[in-house]
Amino acid sequence: MSYVVDFVTVSTVGLESSPHAEALAGLRANEARYYKNKYDHTFTTVPAEDDPATLDWIHHILKAERDLAIASRPLEVSSFEVDGIRMAYVFYESGLSINVMYTSADAGKRAVGFKLCDGMEVPAELADRFKFARQKSKLAGTIRGSFFVIKDEY
């Protein structure tokens, strides 16, 4: 069942099993607000097991590009297209959020972004490989983020 993410009234729906459910819900709401304001897109998520294709696509890119496998359990995913950009998200039980931005045009931007919710430790699989910058969010507190550019085609 899909969930329309409300960034006015932040809810932990679908994220309850995370020890950082409140902060992860704020992070998810922060993403929803961004897409609503920039693209007038309504951000929706589904349980990860309901959309294995999106989860597999993200995990395939992580493995192929950086030999990464995330240890935490995926809770929710989102997949949509705005302005010729395919976006895919996965929210993990640990408080980690990963997004893939994949522009369909040949010379377009393609990247994987990592965001850590407030209060979580950097996952071991990312700790020695990425530096995380901090940003403040009214919805999510302090978000730490990093990214890498996708080199191949998927």
Image: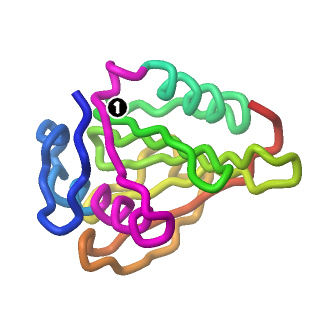
Residue 153 x/y as whole percent: 80, 34
Quadrant in the picture for residue 34: bottom left
Please say whether residue 44 is one of the residues in the magenta stretch.
Answer: yes
Residue 48 x/y as whole percent: 34, 27
Please say whether residue 123 is one of the residues in the magenta stretch.
Answer: no
Q: Is residue 10 left or right of residue 56?
A: left
Magenta segment main secondary structure: helix
Residue marked by disc 1? 74
Q: Is residue 55 left or right of residue 93?
A: right
Crowdedness of circle 1 by 10 Å Cα count: few (<14), some, many (20+)?
A: many
Q: Is residue 94 left or right of residue 58?
A: left
Viewer-side residue, 131 vs 144: 144
Q: Secondary structure at mark 1?
A: strand
Amino acid type at image mark 1: Pro
Q: Which residue is rendered at x = 25% and y = 52% of the image?
A: 5
The part of the chain drawn in magenta is 27-51
Which colour assignment does the render follow? rainbow
In the rendered view, tell whether residue 78 sits above or below residue 54: below
